[in-house]
Amino acid sequence: MPSEEVERRLREAYEKDFHFEDGHVLGSMCSKPEELAVKYHALFSEANLGNRGLYPGTAMLEDELISDISELVHLRNGWGQFVGGGTEANITAMWIARNLSGKKKILAPESAHFSMKKAADLLGMELVDVPLDDGYRMDADALESRIEEDVAAVMGVAGSTELGTVDPIDEISGIAGDIFLHVDAAFGGMVLPFLEELGIWRGNWDFRVEGVDSMSLDLHKMGMATVPSGILLLRNREYVGPISVESPYLTTERNIGLAGTRPSGAVAGAYAAIKSMGREGYRDIVRRCMDNTRYLVEKMWAVGFEPVIEPVTNVVAFRTDDAERIRAEMDRKGWKISVIRRPRAIRIVVMPYVTKEVIEQFTEVLSDALKSL
C-alpha cells in the first residue's frame, strides 16, 4: 500500500475517535498527555525494559521516576516498576500476596476496580466483597467480621473509580494486621498528595500507614503522561522473589512481573511530564479540577441533580433512576458520560480539559436531553 494511502487511512481512523480536547469526553479517567510527554515517548519507542541491560539510559529514567513517585507517597527504601496500568499492578500485587502467603482469599470493597475479578480468576483465588458504609467507603466493621485464617490479601481503594472515595486505609491496616495490604491508588495517587498540599483534604492513605505493602498508581490519568503509564510500588524488594523467573537469554538473570516486554517509551513520556510540571504544576491542575468540580455540582443542582456524595476528588456522580436513558441520549448528542449502578447515577470525571465553558455547554445540552426524555 502506498504511504499516502496508509497515512490517509490512519488519519481517517483518528478523526473517527473522540478526543479529549473537544471537551465532550466526561466519563474517562485519562487525559490528553503533555506535549513533551508525547515527543519523548516517540523518541524512546524502541526501548524495552523487559531486556533492561540493553537500555541503561531508559532504566536510569525509570529508577529516577520510581524514586520521585515513592517520595510523593512516602515510600522509603522500597521497590517499584513501571507497568501497563492499574489492572496489571493490581493483578501482580495479588499474585505476590498469594505466593507469599500460600493462601487464596482476597477481601476487597464493593467499590473495587473490576481488575480484582480478573486477578481472582487468573490466580485461582476467591474474591470476597466487603460492604461499603454510608459514605461509600469500605465498612471497617464488615471487614473485621470477614478476617479469617485463609485470607491472603486485603485491598483498599484511594480514589474509587465510581465515586472517587478513599477507604479508611489506616483503620483497614489495623484490622488486617499481618495480612498483605494493597492500596489501589490508580486514580488517587496523582490527586490526593496535591489535595493535601492544597489543604483541601487530609487522610492517612499511603505508605505512611505501616501496614501498606503495595500500591498501584497510574500516571496516564492525572499524571498527564502517555498511555500506558502505570506503576507498582512495594514496601519490600524481597516481595518480588515469588514473581520472578529465570531469563537466561536476556541481559538480566531474572524477569520480574507479568510482562516480558515493558512499555518503555511511556517511561520517557512520564518522566518528561513529571519533571517539566513538578509539584507546583500538579497542584495547579488539581486545584483547577476541584474548582471546576464544585462548579459542575452547582450547575447540576440548577438542572435538578443531587450529587451522591460531596466530591472527595474530581469524580462526581449524580443520582437518577434514568441513568442509562440519559447516557444514551447524551451519547446521541455527542457527549460521553458514564453511569454507576449502586446507587443509580450518572458519573462525570472533571479532568484538566473539562473547563467551566465545557461544563456550561454540557448542562445546556443535558437540559435539552431531559426535555426530550
Image: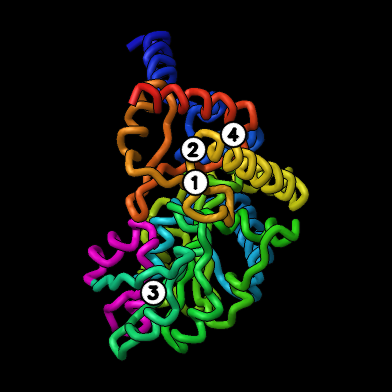
- The residue that disc 4 covers is 354
> Does the segment drawn in magenta span residue 317?
no
Instruction: Tell me the tag on residue 304.
Output: 2
Three-letter amino acid code of the residue under disc 4:
Val
Judge depth for marks 1 and 3 and give the one in front: 1
Q: Which residues are magenta?
A: 97-124
Residue 198 appearing in the image: yes
Quarter-of-image position of residue 106: bottom left
Measuring from the top left, give residue 118's x and y in whole percent.
28, 59
Q: Is residue 211 above or below residue 361?
A: below
Whichever of callouts 3 and 2 sits on the residue coming sooner in the sequence is 3
Judge depth for marks 1 and 4 and give the one in front: 1
Whichever of callouts 4 and 3 sits on the residue coming sooner in the sequence is 3
* Disc 1 from disc 4: Cα separation: 20 Å
| Residue at figure coordinates x 50%, y 71% from the top left | 214
Whichever of callouts 1 and 4 sits on the residue coming sooner in the sequence is 1
- Labels 3 & 2 near each other (Cβ < 8 A): no
* Disc 4 from disc 2: Cα separation: 21 Å
Q: Nearer the viewer, residue 344 or 255?
A: 344
| Residue at figure coordinates x 61%, y 43% from the top left | 293
Instruction: Tell me the tag on residue 68.
Output: none
Q: Is residue 99 above or below residue 256?
A: below
- The residue that disc 1 covers is 306
Asked whether, in this view, residue 288 is left or right of residue 368, the answer is: right
Asked whether, in this view, residue 262 is left or right of residue 224, the answer is: left
Q: Nearer the viewer, residue 215 or 131?
A: 131
